């Protein structure tokens, strides 16, 4: 059986939709926010796992552009949870060599959260043990539209030749610029959809779905995802024979 610890088969970048907090709480007859708090524990498990296994990049979908439309009490509770988590976890992450980044529309967040995000990024800048990107207030369509707007403005100002706009230039203006595209995508919570996560970057990512709700995440589940990933053949449009070096 192929081992998921084979470095050749380890994802260089893992992207996760952390879904199912609300249902986890509802099953326990507790408010949805109880599930979000439990979800924060699962985030720690996931970070520890990536550090231990040597996965160099982890991107977590924590709050989507569309999640702003949830009831105000839930959004407020999530904001307080982000703030508390940033206050309590950033020093420890910095000490462990984690570089923290945020992607998403920051203008929508309260000033006190924006300041904490900037401080967290500054405090962990240059750390390369694990590049941890939190997608918050993030939407894949927003990201692509924002990059296009930036390029269009440069073209209109005469600083950019529209003919030079290609896939790699556009990719270089997206939130995850500089990181390899995710090799493995995981979604917990049982739904099989992308929900406006990394639309551009997931083009050739291996997708892995589980019924497990995010707060129930454990190492064994991540191991299972990794060993399934290690067994897949990624063809990128080629034939198996080509990949085996057998020509056309
Ligand atoms: C994911 O869990 C966390 C956020 C979207 C903030 P949900 O809150 O979507 O939980 P379910 O999907 O309703 O169970
Ligand atoms: C996706 O989950 C966003 C995050 C986990 C942050 P949602 O719960 O918002 O997605 P849908 O509504 O089920 O598609
Ligand atoms: Mg959900």
Image (spheres, helix red, strand yellow):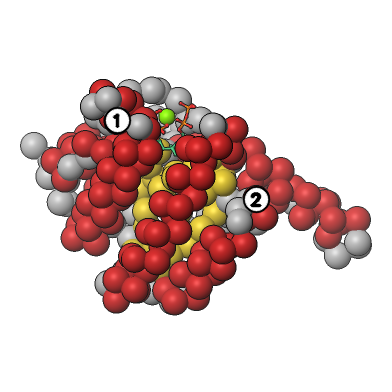
233 left or right, relative to 222: right
Q: Is residue 186 above or below residue 9?
A: above
Q: Quadrant of residue 84?
A: bottom left
Q: Position of residue 189 (x, y in %)?
A: 32, 28
**For the point 29% across and 71% down, which residue is it?**
92
Q: Quadrant of residue 184?
A: top left
Residue 208: in sight, yes or no? no
Q: Position of residue 226 (x, y in %)?
A: 22, 42
Mark 1 CB within 8 Å of ligand 1:
no
Q: Quadrant of ligand 1?
A: top left
Q: For this rendering, which residue is in front, 45 or 89?
A: 89
Residue ID for mark 2:
108
Residue ID for mark 1:
30
**For the point 27% across and 25% down, which residue is it?**
29
Q: Quadrant of residue 82?
A: bottom left
The C terminus, quarter of image: top left
The N terminus, quarter of image: top left
Say the numbered circle drawn on residue 73.
none
**For the point 60% across and 53% down, which residue is it?**
109
- For disc 1, the neighbor class at 10 Å (few under 14, some 14 to 19, many from 20) is few
Q: Secondary structure at mark 1?
A: loop
**For the point 31% across and 25% down, which residue is it?**
26
154 left or right, relative to 21: right
80 left or right, relative to 141: left
Instruction: Give whichever of discs 1 and 2 has the lower sequence position.
Output: 1
Q: Is residue 138 above or below residue 12?
A: above
Q: Position of residue 145 (x, y in %)?
A: 71, 43
60 left or right, relative to 54: right
| Number of numbered discs on residues | 2
Q: Secondary structure at mark 2?
A: helix
Viewer-side label of 1, 2: 1
């Amino acid at each position: 059986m192929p081992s998921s610890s084979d470095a050749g088969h380890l994802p260089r970048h893992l992207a996760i939709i952390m879904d199912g907090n609300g249902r986890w709480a509802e099953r326990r007859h507790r408010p949805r926010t109880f599930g979000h708090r439990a979800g924060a524990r699962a985030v720690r498990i996931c970070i520890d796992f990536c550090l231990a296994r040597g996965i160099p990049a982890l991107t977590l979908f924590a709050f989507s552009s569309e999640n702003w439309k949830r009831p105000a009490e839930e959004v407020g509770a999530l904001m307080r949870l982000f703030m508390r988590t940033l206050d309590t976890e950033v020093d420890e992450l910095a000490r462990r060599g984690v570089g923290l980044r945020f992607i998403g529309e920051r203008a929508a967040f309260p000033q006190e959260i924006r300041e904490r995000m900037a401080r967290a990024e500054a405090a962990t800048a240059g750390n390369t043990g694990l590049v941890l990107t939190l997608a918050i207030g993030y939407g894949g369509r927003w990201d692509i539209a924002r990059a296009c707007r930036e390029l269009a403005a440069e073209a209109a100002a005469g600083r950019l030749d529209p003919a030079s706009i290609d896939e790699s230039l556009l990719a270089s203006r997206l939130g995850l610029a500089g990181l390899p595209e995710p090799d493995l995508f995981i979604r917990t919570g049982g739904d099989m959809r992308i929900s406006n996560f990394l639309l551009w970057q997931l083009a050739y990512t291996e997708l892995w779905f589980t019924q497990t709700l995010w707060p129930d995440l454990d190492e064994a589940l991540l191991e299972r995802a990794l060993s399934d990933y290690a067994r897949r053949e990624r063809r990128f449009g080629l034939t198996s024979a080509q990949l085996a070096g057998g020509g056309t």
